[in-house]
Amino acid sequence: MKRKQIFIMTLAVIATVTSTTTYIPAVDASTSSYRQAKTSLHLRQGASLEQPSLTVIPTGIYVTELSKVGTWSKVQYGTKIGYASTKYLLTDEQIGGKRIGHTLIANKNLALRATYAPGENQQARAAFEKMRVAAKKEGITLVAFSTYRSYAYQKTLFDKYVARDGYEKASTYSAEPGKSEHQTGLAFDIGGADSTKYATFSFSKTKEAKWLFANAHRYGFHLRYPSGKESWTGYTYESWHYRYVGATLAARLKVSGLTMEEYFHLAPWKPVKVSTP
Ligand SMILES: [Zn+2]
């Protein structure tokens, strides 16, 4: 093979690799029925309460409903297949937001149901702990100072901000109930050793924020509201707000430099111009 040919082929390979890392994959076209356990739920060997439990399905994690047997659903959770009571399995409709594959999106356009209350996500907490321990070894202190927030709590919070700053300003840094990612149990507000910098712009200048920016994706966390993406996310830069998406997606998002809205071809948040007469 001639040198020039090899060079062209190499270019083609680079182009392919580049396009697979920055190309945005199409939305999961699978028609499987995804469900989430309403409360921690036994996955049983058969369709009866007398059947032995194979494992417990935690809340906030998608399982696949394969079929229905009376009031029971045949469910796949990870590599295990068993049965769970259908009435404790939430549908996409009951969850709200938008599901793409196994990823739940909540933003200013996609609100979660008021009744969706999964609590803090166990996988996200385990990933955070792993990250915290790894950071500690490098002399970095990480603290998750706010994780799961219920619909009711977010309502209290948002109402308080609106009373203080007005709706328009409050909306730039806080979410209306149902639209907060914290309700998914997957959002972790992370701070460092200095608690006075929690949820403030000054946190972005700390070594902890820099460490997170460089490493969080390796533990499955995505910087959800980056600087310069306000028109997509609807939020000002939050150097402390990380969303657990799993290591695979977090790595893809990191390489792409995209927000979840851009990556998944979702509608951007468009600020409404209010003209005063
Ligand atoms: Zn947050």
Image: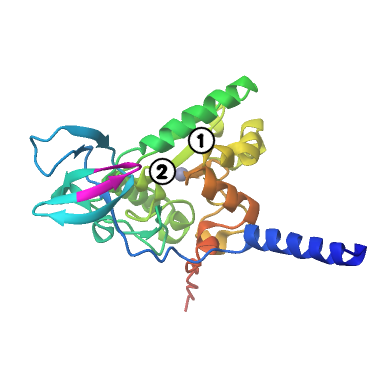
Q: CA distance from mark 2 to mark 1?
A: 12 Å
Q: Main secondary structure of the magenta part?
A: strand
Check mark 1 vs ligand 1: CB closer than 8 Å? yes or no.
Answer: no
- The answer to which of 137 and 20 lies nearer the viewer is 20
The location of residue 267, given as percent across then percent down, is 47, 69
The location of residue 113, given as percent across then percent down, is 27, 56
Relative to residue 169, is residue 37 depicted above or below? Answer: above
Classify mark 1: residues with Cα within 10 Å, few (<14), some (14-19) or many (20+): many
Q: Secondary structure at mark 1?
A: strand
Closer to the eye: label 2 or 1: 2
> Which numbered dot is residue 190?
1
The location of residue 201, given as percent across then percent down, is 59, 43
> Which numbered dot is residue 150?
none
Q: Is residue 77 magenta?
A: yes
Which quadrant, please, contains the N terminus? bottom right
Q: Quadrant of residue 28?
A: bottom left
Name the residue at 47% across, 73% down.
Answer: 274
Relative to residue 34, is residue 29 depicted above or below? Answer: below
Residue range corresponding to the magenta coloring: 74-81
Check mark 2 vs ligand 1: CB closer than 8 Å? yes or no.
Answer: no
Residue 62 lies left or right of residue 8; in this view the side is left
Residue type, label 1 = Ile
Q: Quadrant of residue 168?
A: bottom left
Q: Secondary structure at mark 2?
A: loop
Residue type, label 2 = Leu
Name the residue at 32% across, 53% down.
Answer: 177
Name the residue at 25% across, 55% down.
Answer: 66
Q: Which residue is mark 2?
A: 186
The location of residue 81, given as percent across then percent down, is 26, 44
